[in-house]
Amino acid sequence: MVEETMDRAAFQVIVLGPTGGPKEDAVTGLLVRSTSRNWSRSSVVAVDAGTLLAGIVRILDQTLTTDKDGKAAVENGPFMGLQPPHKTAQANAAYIFREVIASVLITHPHLDHLSGLAINTPIVEASNGPKTVAGLPSAISAMKNHMFNDIIWPNLSDEDGGAGLITYQRLVEGGNPRFGRGDSRGYVRACEGLFTKCLSSDGNIYSPVRSPHLASNLAATPSKDTTNWGVVESSAFFIQDEHSGNEIIIFGDIEPDSVSLEPRNKRVWEIAAPKIASGSLRAIFIECSYNDAIDDETLYGHLCPRHLIAELKVLAAKVVEARSLPLEQEQQQHEQRRRGRSSKRKRRDSDAQVSPHSNRQFTTHLAKPQDSIERSTQTPKGNNHNSKDDAVMTDHHSGQIQIENNAIDGDEVNDNDNKAEESDCFQTESDMQWTGPPPLAGFKVYIIHIKDTLADGPHPSERILEELRSQSDDVGLGCEFHVPYQGEGIFI
């Protein structure tokens, strides 16, 4: 895999656990740091913690060396540049967990995203202060009530009389508008050099939930009358580099909008698209748990290639729209100026001319110039919306559709009618195709949470990657798909 060189990259992402099980030693866990910071105190954030300390130990076991003076050093691998204060991999891993990792972001409270945190937390030392665990209120509530509750695991939090080894940070869904300005509005500090904003995405839906007791963060789906469905809210973290302003997104489990009872992914894409258009959003880490052989009924809140491609098509449509927006605004301003001049001219020319010999009022009507209504949108597939009075012209380089209305002299143009006609000929964003350069060209999509079958033969990732690339080529997305391996350090 070809990565950005270190001197150009804003982020380093270390993959501690890239899978969705069933092996417990490689489930979801990532470390993220800004390359503008050294391996200093609180310079790393963990995103999910199915695998955490064990993953760090595994990497250091393979890369930690001893120099001629007997001092430990890391000369290669993802922790290259770290100045290890101890001799063994285990001791240095504990140091990274205690001091270098500032906080742990939890996308949702499933064990494959949380178990490592629970097992690792007892090594937190009072001298380092509590470890911050951040997530949406639903995720914090689930951890508090169902894990760190003195039943499943000791209450190691600083709430309800706990041991005080972790402190909960309840994030505002969509970002806290009181923090940050401009492109950083709503973001909070995740670690030194990185900010984050959390958005809810489609979560996991399981059927049936046979227990008569649903947790406070679970809800019965109202549209199902015959059985209870448990809904677990998942989320996506936008992570922004303070130095460059560049961003990545890391998703938890995600259900496709097309089958979700409460579609939420489109909102994430709407926020992401302008960032891709401007070049600031560089990559996403998103799950694709199964290949396309799976039925929708057994996805249980996960993605397969056909659904991931459908989601990315929605994103691509939003990116095309975002890129055409400046031109659209310029055209709208030009149209407003033109209409303003026309209105002034009309008012001047329509002033009453009263003859001294008559009480009759004479008004001069000028022929109205041809109106041109220009709108910026995607070119829908098979759009032949033409009439004898309308000419539809498509600019294949910009993705612009221009509708020219040949107005009769003296007639007024009804914009609402034009919009209604135009909307009738458009398909949904996921069905749209585009001309010109691929809308997601160069954009990196890292596939995580693949479910291993533990069977003979090729790893499931091979087929998933093949299906994704083939379907992406068919619709011309242009993005790059990668499946990271455990222990990989990715520069973005």
Image (cartoon, helix red, strand yellow):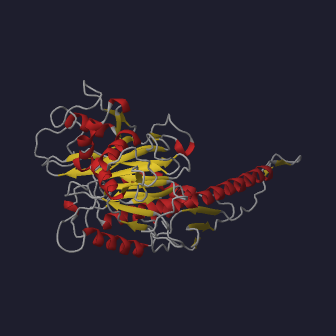
Residue closer to the observer: 248 or 379: 248
Residue closer to the observer: 230 or 80: 80
113 left or right of 237 in image? left
- Residue 263 visible to the viewer: no
Q: Which residue reaches farthest front?
A: 69
Placement of the N terminus among the 4 image quadrants: bottom left
Q: Which residue reaches farthest top?
A: 161
Please give the name of the residue rendered at 44% of the width and 47% of the height, measured from the top-left corner. 83
Residue closer to the observer: 1 or 181: 1
260 left or right of 178 in image? left
**109 is higher (above) or lower (below) than 23:** above
Percent across and percent down for residue 393 are 58, 72
Residue 17: quarter of image: bottom left
- Residue 375 visible to the viewer: yes
Residue 76: quarter of image: bottom left
Percent across and percent down for residue 395 are 59, 71
**197 is higher (above) or lower (below) than 168:** below
Percent across and percent down for residue 13 are 41, 54
292 left or right of 239 in image? left
Residue 190: quarter of image: top left
Number of numbered tags placed on the structure image = 0
Residue closer to the observer: 75 or 172: 75
Percent across and percent down for residue 317 are 47, 63
